[in-house]
Image (tube, helix red, strand yellow):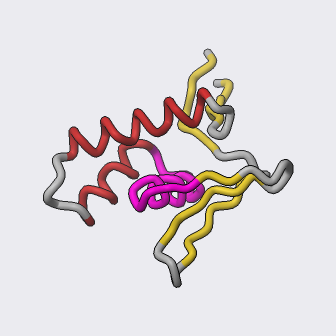
């Protein structure tokens, strides 16, 4: 059975925080493209690079932003993943069992 077990960011992408400017970026090291990220997207992608699941990412972010509902955070994460998948930045991890 083929089952999707999360997502991954190809190694050609680098995530950086420019602390002096409080800005967040995703860089494509192969073609030089860059994408500005908001804080939540930056946190999400860093957690994803640590192989966290969507659930774990949502839980971690909701712990830092208690004023936002978990449903809203999960909705935002799902939207981010959909957009990045469409752009080819994010890839599904597939595991054959």
Residue that extends furthest to the front in the rendered view of this protein: 21
Q: In percent of the image, x 18 and y 52: which residue is there?
A: 68
Q: Main secondary structure of the magenta part?
A: helix
Q: In percent of the image, x 55 and y 56: which residue is there?
A: 36
Quadrant assignment for the N terminus: top right
Residue 79: horizontal and vertical position, in percent?
41, 33
Residue that extends furthest to the left in the rendered view of this protein: 67
Residue 22 counted in the magenta span: no
Q: In terms of depth relative to the viewer, which is nearer, 71 or 50? A: 71
Residue 75: horizontal and vertical position, in percent?
31, 35
Q: Is residue 64 left or right of residue 67?
A: right
Residue 78: horizontal and vertical position, in percent?
40, 34
The relative height of residue 86 versus residue 30 in the rendered view (above or below) is above
Quadrant assignment for the C terminus: top right
The stretch of residues the image draws in magenta is: 36-53
Residue 70: horizontal and vertical position, in percent?
21, 45
Q: In percent of the image, x 57 and y 23: which residue is there?
A: 3
Q: Quadrant of residue 67?
A: bottom left
The relative height of residue 88 versus residue 31 in the rendered view (above or below) is above
Residue 38 counted in the magenta span: yes
């Amino acid at each position: 059975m083929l089952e999707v077990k999360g997502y991954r960011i190809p190694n050609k992408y680098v995530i950086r925080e420019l602390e002096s400017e409080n800005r967040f970026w995703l860089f494509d090291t192969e073609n030089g493209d860059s994408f500005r990220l908001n804080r939540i997207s930056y946190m999400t992608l860093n957690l994803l690079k640590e192989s966290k699941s969507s659930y774990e990412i949502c839980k971690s972010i909701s712990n830092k932003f208690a004023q936002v509902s978990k449903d809203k955070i999960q909705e935002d994460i799902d939207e981010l993943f959909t957009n990045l998948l469409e752009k080819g930045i994010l890839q599904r991890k597939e595991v054959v069992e």
